[in-house]
Image: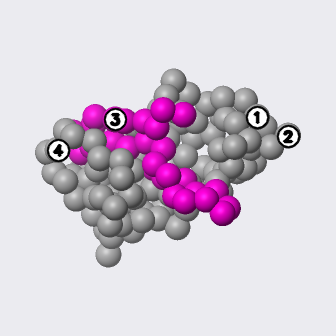
Amino acid sequence: QLQLMESGGGLVQPGGSLRLSCAASGFTLRNYAIGWFRQAPGKEREGVSCISSGSNADYDESVKGRFTISRDNAKNAVYLQMNSLKPAETAVYYCSAAYTPGTVQVMCNSAYYDSWGQGTQVTVSS
């Protein structure tokens, strides 16, 4: 059974950093595009960053230069390094997967992804 598990969320002060991890079980991540999305209370889910199976990455404009997505196929995991966090980025962060072997194009629309983790809470507050 295909499962995704996020970890690394928590409480951080404005300007601080967190590194989120997305671990996969039941399948090999290297053949999947992975997306990080977030949803704040009362708001729609939005794309943060996505990486294709070919390791091309894309970012929402609001996080460019501060967030970095990476994948470690040997560890079957994808990471999201988040720096200079802002209070408005408080949300539940989800990772998601779409089976797309050998694809270089990055798709960062939630409708593209069909497997989702349970999410990890990120709270940015002083």
- Marks 1 and 3, Cα distance to the nearest angstrom? 25 Å
Which residue in the rendered view is the most extreme toward the top?
65
Q: Secondary structure at mark 1?
A: loop
Residue position marked by numbered label 2 in the rendering: 126
Task: Sort mark 1 into few (<14), some (14-19) or many (20+) by Cα contacts within 10 Å.
Answer: some
Task: First in sequence, mark 2 or 4: give its number.
Answer: 4
Task: First in sequence, mark 3 or 2: give its number.
Answer: 3
Do callouts 2 and 1 mark residues in contact (Cβ within 8 Å)?
yes
Q: Secondary structure at mark 2?
A: loop
- Residue in the picture at 74% in, 41% down: 87
Q: Where 22 sits versus 66, above or below? A: below
Amino acid type at circle 4 is Thr
The disc at residue 103 is 4
Which residue in the rendered view is the most extreme toward the right?
126
Amino acid type at circle 1 is Pro
Residue position marked by numbered label 1 in the rendering: 14
- Marks 2 and 4, Cα distance to the nearest angstrom? 41 Å
Task: First in sequence, mark 1 or 3: give its number.
Answer: 1
Q: Secondary structure at mark 4?
A: loop
